[in-house]
Amino acid sequence: MKKLLLLVLLLALGAGGYYYYRSLKNGPKGALVSAAAAVQAHDMASFEKYVDVNSVTSHLVDDVAQQGSALTSLLPGGSLMMGGALRMLKPTLAKAARQEVQRYVETGSLEAAAAAAPKRLVNISLTGLAGRVVSPESEFKGIKYTREEGDNAFVGLEVTQPKYDTTMVVEVKMRRQGDHWQLTQITNSGELLRGVARLEKKRLLNR
């Protein structure tokens, strides 16, 4: 009888483990892992299943447009790229940003992605700016937090920034899409750009 009870308990734990694995695989964390795997495989179609590239780039243009002073610190001629000019060119910039993201997924290189950006009146590479926050030397430390609110979820991804001897948390917003989750926005991109601008200014002053 004891052996039967133990067997039932083990089976229940096994089933619980399976459903936990399934919930993790099909949850926000699993979607991010799948998106990362798509980048490693250079598979744009799979990447777009887990990342709404149009939504992410559109929000990113809006956020960058509000960071005039940060752009001045991070980019040559950044003072010319104030919010008004960027907002006027939002459709063009969002389309160009999508091309950069596609190039990054295909090559795994931020440099190649930035080079794919077409020349235009306001010459700004959104993947280039992203490289200021998460540099090629950065490492993923782990998931800082996950917060689900109905069909939305917010995940904090902690990454190192060796250039400034610190870590940063990139918060992404995700939305449930049937049987999987999809990343739709980087919610703190403006805050991250301002933080990097401050760190860069401090680094230059301490030279």
Image: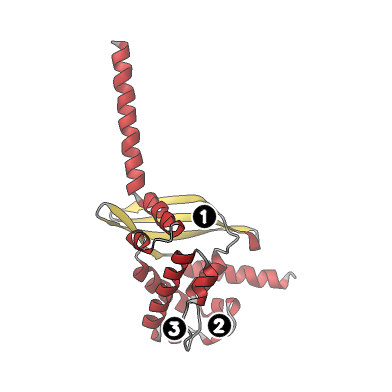
Contact (CB < 8 A) between labels 2 and 3? no
Tag 2's secondary structure?
Answer: helix
Q: Amino acid at mark 3?
A: Leu
The residue indicated by pointer 1 is 158
The residue indicated by pointer 2 is 78
* For residue 205, side relative to residue 122 (left or right): right
Q: Amino acid at mark 1?
A: Glu
**Residue at image x 56%, y 69%?**
132
Rendered position, 142 above or below 136: above
Distance Cα–Cα, label 2 vs label 3 = 11 Å
**Residue at image x 37%, y 74%?**
58
Contact (CB < 8 A) between labels 2 and 1? no
Extreme residue in the bottom direction: 121
Tag 3's secondary structure?
Answer: helix
The residue indicated by pointer 3 is 86
Judge the density around disc 2: few (<14), some (14-19), many (≥20) Cα neighbours within 10 Å.
some
Extreme residue in the right direction: 207
